[in-house]
Amino acid sequence: MAETRTDEVDGPSTDGVEDLTDLYRQYGDDRLPPGQRETDRFPVLSKSGTPAWGPEETFEVWGAVDEPISLSLEAVTELPAVTQRQDFHCVTGWSKLDCAFTGVEFAEIAERAGVREDAEHVLFHALDGYTTDLPLEECTREGVLFAYGYDGGDLPSDHGGPLRVVTPHKYAYKGAKWVSGVEFLTDRELGYWEKRGYSDTANPWNEERYS
């Protein structure tokens, strides 16, 4: 089944960059979620340091799909791509606004894999063993990208490069760094931080930080 994006936010395009920074209007009047502070820095947080993406690593898609996928990083970067200006909200309380991420939309991968009718959740897997879960309908929203570019350059390795997920409508721990695979599930499976007490829904405008 080919997935389509839902709850889209359309913004003006400048030099090929799609502006999604008004996404917050779906949740209220304030661009900065409650309890967040704006920063010009881009702090580095991870569970266990920065893993290396070797030449043998592949990006895998499996589970409740008709066509499992295995791609090299180069093949991922050759897929149709977009550049979007998004806001980035960390559960620890900081937000970096106007981040320009370049990458492949989740919906593009879902369509190529042929997601089955019984798929309801998505578990993202990372090189460092990290996992995080989102409902499928939350993944097909505009703005959810497999990002490999940031602000006109490559995505830095300490921020999840060469490939990470970005989820502007969720706290950033829902966007796995160093993402190596996507597993489509018929039932929910809690991820690394969700098993340790973090919110499974992770809505910044409702301050859903912990369960």
Image: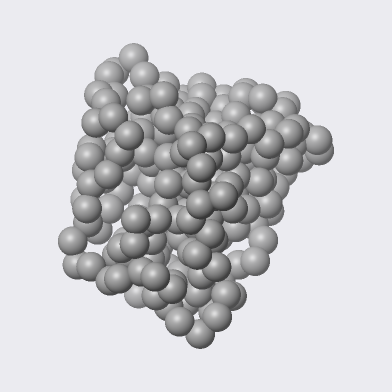
Residue drawn at x 56%, y 50% is: 211
Furthest residue toward top? 56
In the image, is residue 144 above or below residue 187? below
Between 83 and 87, the residue placed more toward the observer is 87
Between 111 and 6, the residue placed more toward the observer is 6
Between 172 and 8, the residue placed more toward the observer is 172
In the image, is residue 36 above or below residue 177? below
Give the x, y percent position of residue 78. 40, 38
Give the side of residue 92 with respect to residue 68, left or right: left
Residue drawn at x 68%, y 51% is: 137
Give the x, y percent position of residue 22. 47, 77
Picture quarter containing residue 47? top left
In this picture the colour scheme is one colour
Furthest residue toward bottom? 29
Furthest residue toward left? 41
Give the side of residue 106 with respect to residue 64, left or right: left
Residue drawn at x 51%, y 85% is: 29
Give the x, y percent position of residue 141. 60, 57
Q: Is residue 206 visible?
A: yes
In the image, is residue 180 above or below residue 205? above
Between 96 and 36, the residue placed more toward the observer is 36
Residue drawn at x 34%, y 14% is: 56
Q: Is residue 103 visible?
A: no
Give the x, y percent position of residue 144. 51, 53
Q: Quadrant of the N terminus?
A: top right
